[in-house]
Amino acid sequence: MTNRFIKSNSTYLSKRERIKDISIIIPKIRSEFYVRLYSLLDCEPEISDKGYEFFIKDTLTAKEFSAGLTGFGPGYFALDKSNEMIDLVSKFHDSLFNKLTDLKECKIEIENDFGKSVFGYENN
């Protein structure tokens, strides 16, 4: 399923709504979410003042959504909250957190009101 989801070059995703949350009580989820997204999509995210965002396209349905970290924690965002979109995002999430995912070394730094956050992975 790795090739099914690719980086989207769409610019119209700015009016999307959060459709799936990821619990912030999971240890290191902010960083792990970034590393897995980077590793699967093989691209840098867009950086915002409170986090990062990856834009994603499903090659089977041509539907697009995003995944990222906001001030409310990590989650998924889309233009519509249909059951079909929620199911699609769930499939993506399952493939993203597959234990067999080959993680790539990566690192980003995000400045915010409280200082700087660093997310990444280094294969020692």
Image (tube, helix red, strand yellow):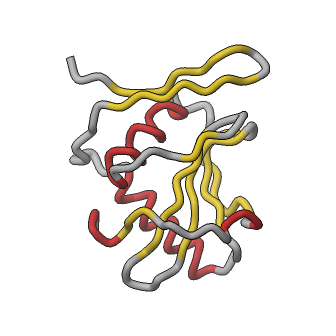
Residue 61 left/right relative to 121: right
Count of marks, rendered view: 0
Question: Residue 38 location in percent, x, y?
Answer: 39, 45
Q: Quadrant of residue 6?
A: bottom left
Q: Residue furthest bottom?
A: 61
Q: Quadrant of residue 2?
A: bottom left
Quarter of the image for the C terminus: give it. Answer: top left
Residue depicted at x 48% and y 26%: 119
Residue 65 left/right relative to 113: left
Question: Residue 123 location in percent, x, y?
Answer: 23, 23
Q: Is residue 10 above or below residue 119?
A: below
Question: Residue 58 location in percent, x, y?
Answer: 43, 75
Quarter of the image for the N terminus: give it. Answer: bottom left
Residue depicted at x 63% and y 67%: 11
Residue depicted at x 56% and y 54%: 67
Question: Residue 92 location in percent, x, y?
Answer: 43, 63
**As rendered, which of 41 and 97 lies closer to the eye?**
41
Residue depicted at x 54% and y 24%: 109
**As rendered, which of 21 and 116 lies closer to the eye?**
116
